[in-house]
Image (tube, rainbow, N blue to C red):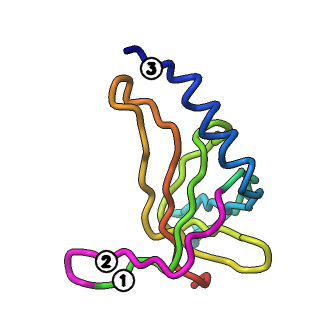
Amino acid sequence: MSVDPKQVLAEVYSGVSEVGRTVSITAYADTYSPVTGNTTRTPTTYTVLASPLYNQTRSITNDSQPRGTAQIIIPAQGVTFTLQAGQKVTVGSKVYTITVVGRLELVSTLEAIAYELTLQEGAP
């Protein structure tokens, strides 16, 4: 049986759009100036579709340290930037920091269909 990656992407997006909402993700680019010795941090904010938060979930690292308090799923369709730990996610009026980015992909094509983000409440 053959799986059409475009159809799977469309189904994931459709499912999340039925129950989800748009969230803002702020990514940062740092530029270091050897002349001044200063680093300039430039934020860029993106708006993406995301599932509802999976509240109170906790991911544990190998050293038993909690890595997050919630998770969300973001369909790969429409993501035009690289998701990374340390970026900020604003859901309603709450701000979270991405601690883990998981990639959900089709085994047959290794094409990303969604990203699972583990979040820690607050923005250090």
Give the answer, above or below, for where 117 lies relative to 77.
Answer: below
Q: Identify which amino acid the numbered label 2 is placed on.
A: Ile
Q: Earlier in the sequence, mark 3 or mark 1?
A: 3
The kind of secondary structure element at disc 1 is loop
User: Which mark is nearer the camera, 3 or 1?
Assistant: 3
Q: Which residues are magenta?
A: 51-64
Q: Position of residue 99 (x, y in %)?
A: 45, 70
Q: Identify which amino acid the numbered label 3 is placed on.
A: Val
The kind of secondary structure element at disc 2 is loop
Q: Are marks 3 and 2 in contact (CB under 8 Å)?
A: no
| Label 3 crowd bin: few (<14), some (14–19), many (20+), radius 10 Å | few
The residue indicated by pointer 1 is 66
90 or 12, nearer to the observer: 12
Does 63 appear in magenta? yes
55 or 86, nearer to the observer: 55
Give the answer, above or below, for where 69 lies relative to 49.
Answer: below
The kind of secondary structure element at disc 3 is loop
Q: Are marks 3 and 1 in contact (CB under 8 Å)?
A: no
| Label 1 crowd bin: few (<14), some (14–19), many (20+), radius 10 Å | some
Residue in the picture at 57% in, 65% down = 87
The residue indicated by pointer 3 is 3
Q: Identify which amino acid the numbered label 1 is placed on.
A: Pro
Magenta stretch, main secondary structure class: loop
Give the answer, above or below, for where 36 lies relative to 93.
Answer: above
Q: CA distance from mark 3 to mark 2?
A: 33 Å
Task: Identify the mark at residue 60; answer none if there is no mark.
Answer: 2
Where, by quadrant of the figure, is residue 26 drawn? bottom right
85 or 17, nearer to the observer: 17
